Image (cartoon, grey):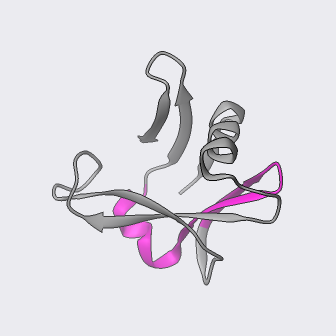
């Protein structure tokens, strides 16, 4: 699995979550919610240090990652994070 994030998305996370250099954001599967690859599950995020990252990307000193234990959610597909200027929100693209 490859993981990527656009610069506008990085800026959004920095502003919305008051992130600083050296911070880490984990993306993980949670039960419930809407959308995603598996029915009944959706993506969530938290500001936490990684234990065993399975995929990661670092931009502007901030680490965005998925733990090895959460890779099943992506079903061997790539994970792209972008900011939609039209919708003014983050979009997760799993393909």
Q: Position of residue 81 (x, y in %)?
A: 54, 41
Q: Residue furthest top?
A: 86
Q: Position of residue 77 (x, y in %)?
A: 43, 51
Residue 37 shows up from this direction: yes
Q: Which residues are magenta?
A: 55-76
Q: Quadrant of residue 66?
A: bottom right
Residue 54's place in the image compared with 59, above or below, is below
Query: Which residue occupies 63% across, 77% down?
Result: 50
> Is residue 84 highlighted in magenta?
no
Q: Which one is in front, 44 or 71? A: 44
Residue 76's place in the image compared with 4, above or below, is below
> Is residue 72 highlighted in magenta?
yes
Q: Give the left or right position of residue 79, taking residue 39 as reference.
A: right
Residue 75 shows up from this direction: no
Q: Which one is in front, 2 or 41? A: 41
Q: Residue furthest bottom?
A: 51
Q: Give the left or right position of residue 44, taking residue 34 as reference.
A: right
Q: Quadrant of residue 43?
A: bottom left
Q: Position of residue 87 (x, y in %)?
A: 43, 21
Q: Give the left or right position of residue 50, taking residue 33 as reference.
A: right
Q: Position of residue 26 (x, y in %)?
A: 55, 65
Q: Give the left or right position of residue 19, taking residue 75 as reference.
A: right
Image label count: 0
**Quick one: quadrant of the C terminus?**
top left
């Amino acid at each position: 699995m490859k993981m990527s994030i656009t610069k506008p998305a990085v800026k959004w996370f920095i502003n919305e979550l008051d992130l600083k250099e050296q911070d880490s954001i984990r993306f993980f599967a949670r039960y419930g919610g809407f959308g995603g690859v598996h029915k009944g599950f959706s993506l969530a995020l938290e500001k936490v240090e990684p234990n065993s990252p399975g995929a990661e990307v670092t931009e502007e000193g901030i680490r965005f990652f998925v733990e090895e234990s959460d890779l099943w959610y992506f079903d061997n597909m790539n994970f792209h994070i972008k900011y939609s200027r039209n919708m003014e929100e983050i979009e997760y693209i799993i393909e």
